[in-house]
Image (cartoon, rainbow, N blue to C red):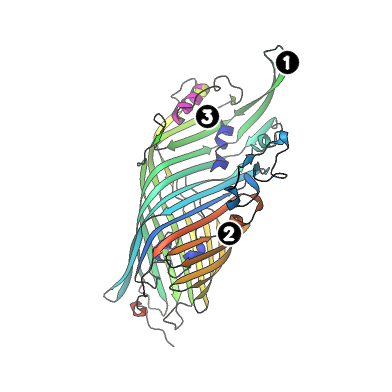
């Protein structure tokens, strides 16, 4: 059963950090920095649409191709018996043979959103609304038991599968962004921002292997139909303690998807920024911000199954073979009947929670010339709620030129602080396009195992808001 669950791992965020350091990003990047709308030189800002997709895994790869190359020609799966592998053939889905594997997947579609900056009694405010459809899924540092199947070699007689978690959620966010200056007696500007988010979730899945599960191989002599003897490999799992929860809008009986709420919740983002203008009213000299992102969770109506037992045979088991899959619940009942002798015993609850991908985001931006900036962004995941989604850890360094009509920049980043990637970004007129992992999109890689891309459309006003909107204490120069 554990092996079957793991098969889903390779079939499945990184954020647009370069663009988030554009002074004119505004409402588009408040999900990364809730104070960003307040710092927008434009008085108003309208975001029409954007998509941001990120994939990274250490389980499998497509050989000798680029992301664009995938669209040209069929991708075959590795076949060791026919000597078709990623090492010797182009466009083959092959596997890493690492002992530990994992993956991250995220997709964020941001819909119509807007912000407006104004003053009340000589105090500046920024108010905005935003809408998003988000999908995230990950497995972090799981034992790669499937490497033996992938290499077509015998599994060990005994193999300890360590505890791990996997989760997935697809949800809609409707958010309110508020930001204002904190009235410190200082020559610098201090800004606080918050996002308040209503969450409506559509699909979710989580799996927890709570204990070390023992995977065991046994060889059995069997008699074939022609009367000859053969040796059959049987695989078992023992000492397992597995919890699985899910909720989905897919109607398996009618094979249709119902776009409706399976769960609801609330989330928050908090941000603080320090800005030093150093006597320059036109632009800042130094900006530092700290942000706590995605604090919250979703309550689901669904199914939670708990499988606890010994000596479960998950290959060559006549009770599990030739079963037509009808729904996850039907299959869970079959497993429950095999383990407990009762198809209903594994169902322990009809509600569960999944936490948002809570993380800390630190940003520092230094002006190094007219409209030119060097930036550092660091994101550290901080899962604090039950069954939390897990953001990828990132450190990103970027250079950007940001003007009213256009902006561009380049970056280098380290996914999980160790896998280096190069990125680039362009904003021209209403169009925004970029990637924090640019090279795999165009340049063939020996082992293509990740990609990142974002594109968006915005409406910019024809002129900037007046500099006098700032209520910070005049500089002493």
Quadrant for residue 183, please give it: bottom left
N-term mark: 2 or 3: 3
Residue occupying image coordinates x 39% and y 67%: 37
Q: Position of residue 339 (x, y in %)?
A: 52, 24
Nearer the camera: disc 3 or disc 1: 1
- Label pair 3/1, CB-CB below 8 angstroms: no
Numbered badge on residue 438: 2
Residue 10 on the magenta segment: no
Residue 330 as seen in the image, left or right of residue 10: left
Determine the residue positioned at 65% across, 42% down. 94
The tag on residue 308 is: 3
Taking depth in this image into account, of 207 and 409 the one nearest to the observer is 409
- Residue 92 in view here: yes
The span from disc 2 to disc 3 (Cα, nearest Å) is: 45 Å
- Mark 3 Cα-neighbour bin, 10 Å: few <14, some 14–19, many ≥20: some
The residue identified by callout 1 is 229
Crowding around mark 1 (Cα neighbors within 10 Å: few <14, some 14 to 19, many 20+) is few
Up the image or down, 146 lies above or below 398; here it is above
Secondary structure of residue under mark 2 = loop
Frontmost of labels 2 and 3 is 2
Disc number placed over residue 430 in the picture, else none: none
Residue interval drawn in magenta: 328-337
The residue at 39%/30% (across/down) is 254
Q: At numbered mark 1, what does the secondary structure look like: helix, strand or loop?
A: strand
Q: Nearer the viewer, mark 1 or mark 2?
A: 2
Which residue is most to the left?
Answer: 121
Q: Position of residue 340 (x, y in %)?
A: 50, 22
332 falls in the magenta region: yes
């Amino acid at each position: 059963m554990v092996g079957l669950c793991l098969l889903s791992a390779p079939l499945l965020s990184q954020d647009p950090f370069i663009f988030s350091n554009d002074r004119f990003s505004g409402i588009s990047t408040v999900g990364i920095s809730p104070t960003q709308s307040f710092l927008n030189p434009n008085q108003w800002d309208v975001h029409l649409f954007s998509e941001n997709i990120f994939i990274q895994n250490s389980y499998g790869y497509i050989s000798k191709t680029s992301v664009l190359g995938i669209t040209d020609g069929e991708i075959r799966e590795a076949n060791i018996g026919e000597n078709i592998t990623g090492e010797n053939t182009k466009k083959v889905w092959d596997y890493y043979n690492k002992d530990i594997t994992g993956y991250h997947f995220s997709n964020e579609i941001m819909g119509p959103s807007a912000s407006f900056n104004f003053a009340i009694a000589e105090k500046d405010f920024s108010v905005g609304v935003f809408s998003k459809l988000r999908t995230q899924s990950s497995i972090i540092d799981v034992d790669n038991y499937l490497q033996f199947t992938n290499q077509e070699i015998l599994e060990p007689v005994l193999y300890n599968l360590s505890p791990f978690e996997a989760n997935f959620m697809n949800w809609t966010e409707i958010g309110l962004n508020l930001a204002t200056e904190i009235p410190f007696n200082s020559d610098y500007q201090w800004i606080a921002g918050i996002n308040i988010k209503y969450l409506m979730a559509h699909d979710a899945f989580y799996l927890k292997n709570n204990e070390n599960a023992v995977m065991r191989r046994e060889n059995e002599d069997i008699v074939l139909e022609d009367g000859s003897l053969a040796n059959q490999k049987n695989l078992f799992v023992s000492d397992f303690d597995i919890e699985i929860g899910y909720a989905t809008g897919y109607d398996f009986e009618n094979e249709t998807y119902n776009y409706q709420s399976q769960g609801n919740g609330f989330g928050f983002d908090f941000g603080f920024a320090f800005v030093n203008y150093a006597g320059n009213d036109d632009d800042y000299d130094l900006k530092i911000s700290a942000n706590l992102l995605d604090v919250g969770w979703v309550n689901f109506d669904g199914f939670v199954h708990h499988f606890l037992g010994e000596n479960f045979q998950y290959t060559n088991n006549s009770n599990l073979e030739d079963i037509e899959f009808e729904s996850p619940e039907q299959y869970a009942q079959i497993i429950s009947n095999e383990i407990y002798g009762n198809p209903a015993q594994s169902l322990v609850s009809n509600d569960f929670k999944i936490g948002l991908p809570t993380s800390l985001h630190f940003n520092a931006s230094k002006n190094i010339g007219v409209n030119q900036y060097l930036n550092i962004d660091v994101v550290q995941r901080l899962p604090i709620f039950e069954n939390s989604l897990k953001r990828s850890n990132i450190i990103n360094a970027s250079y950007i030129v940001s003007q009213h009509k256009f902006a561009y920049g380049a970056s280098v980043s380290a996914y999980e602080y160790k896998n280096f990637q190069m990125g680039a970004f362009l904003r021209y007129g209403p169009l925004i396009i970029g990637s924090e992992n640019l090279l795999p999109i165009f340049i063939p890689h020996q082992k293509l195992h990740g990609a990142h891309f974002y594109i968006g459309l915005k409406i910019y006003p024809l002129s900037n808001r007046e500099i006098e909107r700032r209520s910070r204490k005049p500089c002493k120069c």
